[in-house]
Structure formats: structure tokens, C-alpha cells
Image: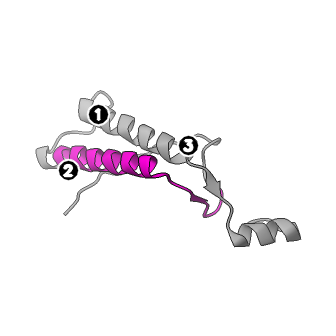
Amino acid sequence: MAASTTTDFAIPASTACVGASRRRITPQAGRALEILGHAIEYLTDEFVQCGSELSPKNGQLEAVQLLMALNRQVYYECPAVVTVSDRIRSMLHLRAA
């Protein structure tokens, strides 16, 4: 079973998702996301198993934060796909709820 930690990571407003947008992920980006996801999961599992303490200068946590930032960067570099509901809202000039 995978273990994870919860942290307060701020996503920059320029990359924050509005609504439930989708992305067209290329095979290369998909593979990168898969590898990064496994690395993040491995480090968080190890962190929990070792019983390490939460501190700002913990190298494992810094590594997880770095990998998560890279994961977001790869994801947000993939082009957004406009959904049918977004197109309809746009045509009708409605705001997303």
C-alpha cells in the first residue's frame, strides 16, 4: 500500500487550473510523469517507513518538493484540451460554475 504525506504546496496562479480542464499528454510527457510519480511515491514511502520528522531542512522532503514541482511543470507544459462544455459555455458567454 502506498503511503503519502500531506503538505501545503502553493500552485502559482499562472498554472492553477480553473474548472476541470484536461491536458493532451504526449507519450514522452506521460513517461516522464510516470517516472516522477514513482520517484515521489518511493521517497514518501521511505520517509513514512523511517519515521522521519517534518522539518524545513529535511533533505527527503526537499527532494519530494523538487520532484513534485517538476511533475507540475511537465504536466502544465502539455496543451490544454477545450472540452465540449467549455465550448458551449464560451458560445453562450456563461461563466464556469
**Residue ID at (21%, 39%):** 53
Q: Which residues are magenta?
A: 18-47
Whether residues under marks 1 and 3 lie with C-beta atoms below 8 angstroms apart, the answer is no
Q: Nearer the viewer, residue 78 or 94?
A: 78
Which image quarter is the N terminus in? bottom left
Question: Residue 44 lies in magenta, yes or no?
Answer: yes
Q: Amino acid at mark 3?
A: Glu
Relative side of 67 to 17, left or right = left
Relative side of 72 to 56, left or right = right
Q: Which mark is residue 55?
A: 1
Res. 53 in view: yes
**Residue ID at (42%, 52%):** 30
Q: Amino acid at mark 2?
A: Asp
Which residue position holds label 2?
Answer: 45
Relative side of 53 to 91, left or right = left
Extreme residue toward the top, this view? 57
**Residue ID at (79%, 72%):** 88
Extreme residue toward the left, this view? 50
